[in-house]
């Protein structure tokens, strides 16, 4: 007698030992998503520790929001990917590497 449960619900013979092509793609996508979320969490936790922000560090360590809290922290608090702020501060953060003024006055 044929086992209709296995063939009807997709657990029959497939490409990856019982998994069909759709299930294999879902597993691959899920695995890549997990790796990206873990990397994002580590990067955000590193920034929080470096900036000595204990409450942000604790919140991101305990609360799992699939990367949403980490992205919000990096964009709005650390301002890591704010292109407008980055272009406005070019030259302002040279830390003494400014060229000599061209009008003959002394550099500050």
Image (tube, rainbow, N blue to C red):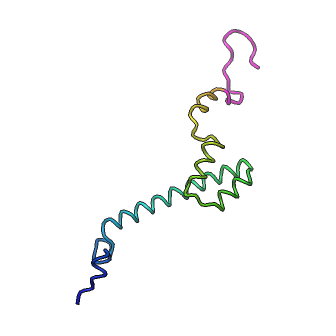
- 97 vs 72: above or below: above
Q: Residue at x 45, y 63 (%)?
A: 31
**96 with respect to 68 (left or right):** right
Q: Quadrant of residue 55?
A: bottom right
The majority secondary structure of the magenta stretch comes to: loop
* Coordinates of residue 108 in the picture (x, y in percent): 76, 20
**Residue 82 at what x, y percent from top left?**
58, 37
Q: Quadrant of the N terminus?
A: bottom left
**Residue at far left of view:** 1
Q: Classify 103 as above or below 57.
A: above
Residue 6: percent from the left, percent from the top? 30, 80
Looking at the picture, how far across and down is residue 34, in whole percent? 50, 61
Residue toward you, 99 or 77: 77
Asked whether 105 falls inside the magenta stretch, the response is: yes
Query: Relative to 47, is 9 on the left or the right?
Result: left
Determine which quarter of the picture holds residue 78: top right
Looking at this view, is 23 or 31 the one in front? 23
Span colored in magenta: 92-108
Quarter of the image where one finds residue 103: top right
């Amino acid at each position: 007698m044929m086992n209709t449960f296995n063939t009807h619900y997709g657990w029959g013979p497939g490409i990856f030992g019982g998994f069909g092509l759709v299930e294999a793609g879902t597993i691959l996508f899920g695995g890549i998503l997990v790796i990206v979320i873990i990397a994002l969490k580590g990067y955000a936790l590193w920034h929080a520790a470096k900036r000595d922000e204990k409450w942000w560090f604790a919140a991101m360590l305990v609360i799992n929001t699939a990367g949403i809290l980490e992205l919000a922290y990096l964009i709005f608090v650390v301002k890591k990917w704010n292109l407008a702020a980055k272009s406005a501060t070019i030259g302002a953060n040279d830390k003494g590497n400014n060229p000599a003024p061209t009008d003959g006055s002394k550099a500050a």
